[in-house]
């Protein structure tokens, strides 16, 4: 039952976050992994048993309805949780093996907390529960990123997206007077501000996934460690965005703007990702752009499947993860250089590892192609073709540059010899074998792409592009657009208001003028109190005048 | 016949005391004895006035009821406080206080007469006596005002007013055939359309306004207060207004109420002017004594605004408000005795810098008293302000109400100036040691204020005025 | 015994004030007395909560005092869950401020005495059940505020302080006018919740409600009254004084809650939308100015103002369409978290500013040198922004949702302001944490002490538990 699994995961994460000594950390994190494996086994058994159950309790009450915590165990949810659970486990395993984190158990705990939040989000049916999980995932992303520069854009954009989703939920709740997500169909009938809700919600999802025009947060992650980048993409906010899309599409797609907006952003993301990955010399940035492309195709495929998650999507996600891990291994064994040119310059001492990584990458590629073929239909064919072609070209160019480019003419430097992690390859290999679907491999399209992939990796004229990297200045145009369209005007507006209202109107005009007037009045008052004959006469005049007025106008009793 | 003589004992003792002070000269070293003697005379007089509280001192010319007893007590308390504080001042400057003591005794006689009088001749006489005492007080202590440009302004004005008052009293007396308030009231009722008679009544009122320093007759107090010595300041801020106010309310209720329709305009105008002058003048001041003088003008103005209605509840409200203001002013005057630098009592606001750190207790009490004057709850002054506003609202005088509050807002600025100097300005000012007795006096004032705040039914709420007025 | 407890709780700070004044002149005495008083107060609040009947509407443990029988003035005091929650929030805020107060010279004595006096007035305000006692304590707050800001606010220009006093005094005077009018037509003292139901001539009703609204709005930094507070808070450097100043708008907000407990007076109805527009304009105005400013403290001020205005908007707009007590409890739950959280952020920020000043180093990136402080700071910022770590999270959701129910446009404006605010604060947090921003590195920057950290973590835990049940401490 998912509820118990969630609770156990939470407890493990809680224990993992206890600060223990560095020496015990490795053992502790290993124990965590073992426990996770055990829970995963239970999860698998439950999944296989196929029993549906619900754990629901009322957390709090409000006039808009009870705030319930629902953890629903059914096949759909198991299927949806499976890839994330697997990825989390692998991420924990990788963390133990590669030892990049100072406090591995704390990082693992963050990953497990994140998984718990994802499960809460997937299984929940309450706005507050969804929002809760959404925010928690974003907060945990802070721990996963752990880099201030990256954190700035990524988190800011995600929080902005959260505020959009918050708004959407608040509007729905106010109209249907219920916090239950299943009631959103009633809102569809009421139909107020449907377009606003759809556009806001979709924008939030795009921000979270990091699709084109909303990818500045993702681009900001280029300087964090690669394994963190992978974990963020496959487990954190982009996934929460996808889940939101699946939960709310019923309502959002009733807007006429939904489909055009979604398709246009996805197409733009594919081309934008392709161009970005081709132009950039930064390896991590390339990965970010590839993920953008992948995010776009995932959304498109989901759209044409009525946003119903299926086994194919789970597989696709896992295959993509294996591919990303293979890229990670290439990065790892080429000396962890960020720039492609740097990677090329280093003559590798780790040929075997690189070749094995390439095999893994190749396996993942054909697995992805196979799954795409399985998901292929009349509606999404153009999108799949576009993605497949652009992705293959972009990926092969980089693979060619990093692994297969002849190095005779290039000044090379010795790359440090890196320990061969056989166990990592073994696990990844098993995973790729698991995600490989033999039936799909025989499809003509798959065969075609396999041949094309191998051919391009070997014979792609990639050397010229390296020269292009040197000339091309990779500027963040979208970031600049944001800056000049939103940030600067807002700041200027604030400054203008501050100067105009606070300084000029209140301080200078209202207070300044009142003070001047008061000072003048005081000076005048002092002058009026000089003992002059005129003054005394005036007093007499006033008094006589008053007496006359009183006599003339006063009534008698 | 003997009983008439006995009932006059309070006055006679005061007269006897004044004779002693006229005959015997006290040296500067004898100041404590001089004040002791003066206090003894006042105490005996007070005791007799309490004993014969329901017996008229001057049969046919005076009244004796609860109100007069209360007002007399108030007068004597004032005198005691003034004497107590004045003794400290005279001790510190090593000067004989005999002249001051005799002045206070004469002023007490005048005050007693004003409070008990029910005859305009007696009233006018008492007013003239009081004015004469004031003139002598200011003349005598002119050393301390030698830089003052306007040292004779009071004398000139008072003399003019005395002449006019005599003329007005003579007119009213001969026209009514008697000086008794009730007879004069009947005469006024009959001669309502006679401008001269009305003018004579107005001059009588103006004399009190002059004593109370209501605008536009406030100038004398403002000119002199700036460099007035502390005992004289207290005398002019506490004693003179108290007796003038006490007499005015009796005059209003017993004689002038028949002219209320006309006098309402006069009172209202005077009140509005005083409130304005008091508030703005206080803001323009940089001298604490002058500021207190303006404060007095402000509160007198409010009293006139209330008194315009000539009803018992209005009078009661005016008394209550006057009492609260008197209490606060009295407290502030006492605190002024705490702030002394190298033997000199402070004058300018600037001299108060650092006061809060050197004299925290006195500064705190002074602050609370200033805020009390502004009517800020939960300080006692808020009760008085509430009573005033309630009274104005009851008579639908909403514009007056708003005006009063607006002026109060302006007045607050001047108090802020003092606070600012005391608390928020650092300086190396040092202050002389203050006697413990002054603090006891201050705590007594605070205790009274707390008591009144907790048990206000002794003062406001029920209409006790009617009961004591004729009781 | 329990019936004496509310009165004792009300006068406890005054008692504390006397003890502080009579404490010996050393650095610790006054502070210890204050902490003891505040802790006792919190215990009393807990005891009162345990006896409180949440199902009962209106004030409980009511205590009447015949003050002026002849004028029909009976002062009435009582508590309900709403006022107790606010009081608990205020006590925790002040306790936190006092605990983190640096041990300094004799100045502490005066500071703490005024602080206790202020607390007495606020307690009185929260306990007041009738208009006279409400007015009394509402106005009384001004004196300690003025003294605290003037003495310990480090003000360079006195004009700001004068403006502060005069603005507030004007508000008090306006409220006094309203009270006098109510007194005139009711012929005596009246319970707060009955005023909206009182029959008055139309003009008088307009004057009364106009006065009440103006007086209460003068306490909230709403345009054009915002200047008095914005000009003051940007200068105050003492955390306790800052917190006390930022509690002032709460008194205005509380006034609205109490005056419109059952219903909104008809005479005000036509102006409600106008008030709402002004509130919204102020919210956006303050947020934009907050973005333009680079100091975290100003952003925090903007944050507090926006939240106060949000609660005010909810009160004035929603009390006509929702059950008043439900709405009030939502706001109270939110405020219970909001007050301590903002106080702690103020304290932490001002401490950092002081550290920078002492060590002559740059403010930006300073948190990179203070890992413990950074953790606690981030936690409280997250809590303040309404993330799911406190009751603020879902109460915000409910309040905003209800605002959408009233008007879509208002809801959008509110969300716009909240979003900008969140982004602005998070950005500033990034600036404070980013080591690269730190121009003049200084290794000697002191981090927060373990004891202080433990205390803040304890408060954090209390507030975190409120996320699961806002009244978890009621047994």
Image (cartoon, coloured by chain):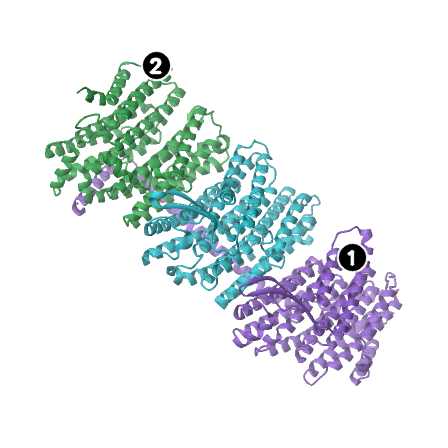
> In which chain is the residue bearing label 2?
B
Chain A hue?
A: purple
Does the residue at mark 2 contact the one at mark 1 (Cβ under 8 Å)?
no
Alpha carbon separation for disc pair 2 and 1:
96 Å
Q: Which mark is residue B27?
A: 2
Residue A476 rendering spot, x and y as whole percentages: 66, 66
Q: Is residue B104 visible?
A: no
Camera-side residue of A447 and C185? C185
Camera-side residue of B344 and C203? C203
Q: Quadrant of residue A361?
A: bottom right
Quadrant location, the C terminus of chain A: top left
> In which chain is the residue bearing label 1?
A
Kindly identify which residue carries mark 1.
A104
Compared with A254, B95 (above or below) is above
Figure chain in green: B
Residue A19 rendering spot, x and y as whole percentages: 75, 52
The outermost residue toward the front is C1
Q: Is residue C88 visible?
A: yes
Chain C hue?
A: cyan
Compared with B73, C72 (above or below) is below
Viewer-nearest of labels 2 and 1? Answer: 1
Residue at (34% x, 14% y) in the render: B27
Q: Secondary structure at mark 2?
A: loop
Q: Quadrant of residue B5?
A: top left
Residue B81 rendering spot, x and y as whole percentages: 36, 26
Q: Are marks 2 and 1 on the same chain?
A: no
Left or right position of C97 against A508 = right
Left or right position of B135 against C402 = left
Left or right position of A138 against B148 = right
């Amino acid at each position: 039952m998912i509820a118990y699994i969630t609770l156990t995961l939470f407890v493990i994460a809680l224990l993992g976050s206890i600060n223990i000594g560095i020496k015990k950390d490795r053992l502790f994190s290993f124990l965590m992994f073992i426990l996770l494996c055990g829970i995963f086994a239970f999860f698998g058994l439950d999944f296989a048993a196929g029993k549906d159950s619900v754990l629901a309790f009322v957390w709090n009450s409000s006039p808009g309805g009870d705030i319930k915590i629902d953890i629903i165990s059914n096949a759909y949810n198991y299927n949806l949780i499976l890839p994330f659970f697997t990825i989390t486990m692998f991420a924990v395993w990788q963390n133990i093996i590669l030892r990049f984190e100072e406090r591995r158990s704390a990082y693992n705990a963050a990953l497990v907390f994140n998984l718990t939040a994802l499960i809460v989000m997937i299984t929940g049916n309450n706005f507050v529960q969804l929002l809760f999980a959404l925010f928690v995932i974003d907060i945990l992303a802070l721990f996963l990123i752990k880099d201030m520069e990256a954190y700035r854009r990524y988190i800011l954009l995600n929080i902005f997206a959260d505020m959009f989703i918050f708004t959407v939920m608040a509007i729905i709740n106010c109209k249907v007077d219920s916090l239950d997500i299943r009631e959103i169909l009633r809102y569809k009938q009421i139909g107020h501000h449907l377009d606003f809700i759809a556009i806001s919600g979709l924008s939030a999802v795009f921000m979270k996934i990091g699709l084109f025009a909303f990818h500045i947060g993702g681009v900001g992650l280029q300087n964090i460690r690669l394994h963190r980048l992978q974990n963020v993409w496959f487990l954190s906010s982009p996934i929460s965005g996808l889940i939101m899309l699946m939960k709310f599409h019923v309502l959002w797609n009733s807007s006429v703007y939904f489909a055009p907006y979604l398709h246009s952003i996805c197409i733009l993301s594919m081309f934008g990702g392709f161009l970005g990955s081709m132009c950039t010399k930064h390896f991590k940035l390339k990965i970010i752009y590839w993920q953008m492309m992948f995010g776009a195709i995932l959304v498109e495929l989901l759209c044409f499947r009525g946003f119903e998650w299926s086994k194919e999507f789970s597989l696709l996600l896992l295959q993509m993860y294996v591919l990303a891990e293979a890229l990670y291994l290439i990065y790892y064994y080429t000396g962890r250089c960020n720039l492609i040119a740097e990677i090329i310059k280093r003559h590798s001492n780790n040929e075997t590892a690189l070749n094995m990584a390439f095999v893994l990458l190749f396996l993942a590629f054909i697995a992805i192609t196979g799954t795409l073929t399985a998901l292929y239909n009349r509606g999404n064919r153009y999108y799949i073709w576009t993605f497949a072609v652009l992705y293959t070209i972009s990926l092969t160019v980089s693979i060619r540059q990093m692994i297969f480019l002849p190095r005779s003419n290039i000044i090379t430097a010795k790359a440090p010899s890196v320990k061969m992690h056989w166990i990592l390859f073994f696990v990844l290999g098993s995973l790729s074998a698991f995600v490989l679907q033999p039936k799909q491999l025989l499809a003509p399209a798959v065969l075609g792409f396999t041949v094309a992939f191998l051919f391009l990796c070997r014979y792609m004229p990639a050397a010229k592009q390296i020269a292009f990297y040197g000339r091309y200045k990779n500027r963040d145009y979208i970031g600049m657009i944001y800056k000049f369209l939103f940030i600067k005007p807002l700041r200027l507006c604030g400054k203008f208001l501050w100067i105009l209202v606070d300084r000029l109107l209140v301080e200078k005009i209202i207070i300044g003028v009142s003070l001047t007037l008061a000072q003048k009045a005081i000076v005048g008052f002092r002058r009026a109190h000089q003992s002059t004959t005129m003054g005394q006469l005036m007093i007499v005049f006033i008094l006589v005048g008053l007496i006359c007025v009183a006599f003339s106008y006063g009534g008698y009793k | 016949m003997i009983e008439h003589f006995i009932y006059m004992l309070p006055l006679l003792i005061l007269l006897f005391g004044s004779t002693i002070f006229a005959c015997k000269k006290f040296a500067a070293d004898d100041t404590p004895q001089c004040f002791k003697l003066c206090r003894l005379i006042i105490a005996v007089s007070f005791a007799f006035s309490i004993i014969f509280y329901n017996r008229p001192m001057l049969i046919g010319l005076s009244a004796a009821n609860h109100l007069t007893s209360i007002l007399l007590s108030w007068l004597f308390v004032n005198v005691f406080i003034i004497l107590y504080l004045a003794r400290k001042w005279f001790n510190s400057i090593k000067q004989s206080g005999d002249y001051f003591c005799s002045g206070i005794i004469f002023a007490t006689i005048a005050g007693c007469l004003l409070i008990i009088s029910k005859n305009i001749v007696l009233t006018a006489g008492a007013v003239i006596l009081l004015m004469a005492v004031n003139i002598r007080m200011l003349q005598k202590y002119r050393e301390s005002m030698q830089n003052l440009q306007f040292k004779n302004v009071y004398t000139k004005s008072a003399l003019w007013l005395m002449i006019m008052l005599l003329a007005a009293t003579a007119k009213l007396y001969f026209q009514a055939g008697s000086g008794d308030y009730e007879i004069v009231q009947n005469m006024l009722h009959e001669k309502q359309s006679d401008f001269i008679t009305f003018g004579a009544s107005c001059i009588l009122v103006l004399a009190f306004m002059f004593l109370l320093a209501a605008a536009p007759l406030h100038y004398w107090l403002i000119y002199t207060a700036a460099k007035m010595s502390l005992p004289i300041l207290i005398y002019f801020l506490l004693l003179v207004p108290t007796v003038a106010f006490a007499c005015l309310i009796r005059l209003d209720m017993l004689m002038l109420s028949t002219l209320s329709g006309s006098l309402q305009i006069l009172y209202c105008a005077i009140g509005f002017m005083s409130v304005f002058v008091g508030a703005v003048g206080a803001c323009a001041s940089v001298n604490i004594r002058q500021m207190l003088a303006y404060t007095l003008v402000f509160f007198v103005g409010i009293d006139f605004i209330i008194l315009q209605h000539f009803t018992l509840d209005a009078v009661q409200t005016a008394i209550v408000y006057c009492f609260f203001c008197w209490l606060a002013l009295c407290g502030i005057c006492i605190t002024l005795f705490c702030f002394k630098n190298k033997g000199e009592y402070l004058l300018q606001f600037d001299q108060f810098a650092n006061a809060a750190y050197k004299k925290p207790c006195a500064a705190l009490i002074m602050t609370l008293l200033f805020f009390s004057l502004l009517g800020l709850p939960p300080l006692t002054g808020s009760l008085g302000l509430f009573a005033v506003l309630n009274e104005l609202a009851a008579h639908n005088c909403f514009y007056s109400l708003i005006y009063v509050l607006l002026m109060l807002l302006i007045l607050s600025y001047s108090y802020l100036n003092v606070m600012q100097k005391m608390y928020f300005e650092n300086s190396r000012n040092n202050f002389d040691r203050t006697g413990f007795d002054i603090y006891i006096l201050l705590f007594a004032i605070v205790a009274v204020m707390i008591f009144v705040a907790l048990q206000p039914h002794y003062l406001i709420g029920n209409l006790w005025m009617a009961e004591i007025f004729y009781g | 015994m329990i019936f004496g407890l509310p009165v004792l709780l009300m006068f406890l700070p005054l008692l504390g004030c006397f003890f502080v004044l009579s404490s010996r002149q050393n650095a610790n005495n006054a502070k210890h007395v204050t902490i003891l008083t505040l802790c006792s107060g919190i215990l009393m609040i807990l005891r009162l909560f345990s006896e409180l009947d949440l199902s009962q509407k209106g004030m409980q443990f009511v205590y009447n005092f015949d003050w002026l029988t002849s004028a029909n003035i009976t002062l009435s005091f009582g508590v309900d869950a709403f006022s107790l929650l606010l009081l608990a929030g205020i006590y925790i805020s002040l306790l936190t401020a006092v605990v983190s107060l640096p041990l300094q010279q004799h100045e502490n004595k005066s500071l703490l005495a005024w602080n206790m006096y202020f607390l007495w007035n606020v307690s009185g305000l929260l306990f007041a059940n009738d208009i006279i006692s409400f007015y009394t304590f509402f106005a009384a707050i001004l004196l300690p505020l003025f003294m605290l800001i003037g003495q310990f606010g480090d003000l360079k220009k006195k004009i700001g302080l004068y403006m502060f006093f005069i603005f507030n005094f004007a508000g008090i005077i306006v409220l006094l006018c309203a009270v006098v009018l109510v007194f005139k037509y009711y012929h005596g003292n009246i319970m707060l919740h009955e005023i909206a139901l009182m029959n008055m001539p139309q003009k008088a009703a307009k004057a009364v409600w106009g006065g009440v609204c103006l007086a209460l709005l003068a306490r909230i930094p709403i345009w054009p009254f915002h200047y008095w507070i914005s000009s003051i808070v940007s200068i105050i450097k003492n955390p306790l004084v800052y917190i006390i100043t930022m509690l002032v708008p709460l008194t205005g907000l509380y006034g609205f809650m109490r005056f419109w407990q059952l219903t909104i007076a008809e005479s005000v109805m036509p102006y409600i939308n106008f008030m709402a527009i002004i509130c919204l304009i102020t919210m956006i105005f303050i947020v934009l100015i907050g973005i333009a400013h680079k100091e975290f403290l100003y952003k925090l001020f903007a944050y507090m103002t926006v939240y106060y205005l949000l609660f005010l908007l909810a009160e004035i707009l929603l009390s006509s369409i929702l059950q008043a007590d439900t709405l009030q409890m939502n706001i109270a739950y939110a405020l219970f978290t909001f007050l301590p959280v903002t106080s702690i952020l103020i304290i932490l920020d001002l401490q950092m500013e002081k550290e920078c000043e002492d060590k002559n180093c740059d403010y930006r990136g300073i948190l990179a040198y203070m890992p413990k402080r950074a953790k606690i700071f981030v936690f409280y910022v997250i809590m303040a922004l309404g993330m799911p770590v406190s009751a603020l999270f879902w109460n915000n959701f409910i309040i905003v949702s209800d605002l959408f129910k009233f008007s879509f446009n208002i809801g959008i404006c509110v969300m716009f302001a909240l979003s900008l605010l969140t982004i602005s604060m998070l950005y500033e947090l990034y600036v404070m944490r980013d080591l690269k921003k730190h121009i003049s590195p200084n290794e000697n920057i002191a981090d927060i002490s373990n004891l202080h950290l433990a205390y803040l973590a304890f408060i954090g835990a209390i507030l975190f538990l409120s996320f699961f049940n806002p009244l978890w401490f009621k047994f």
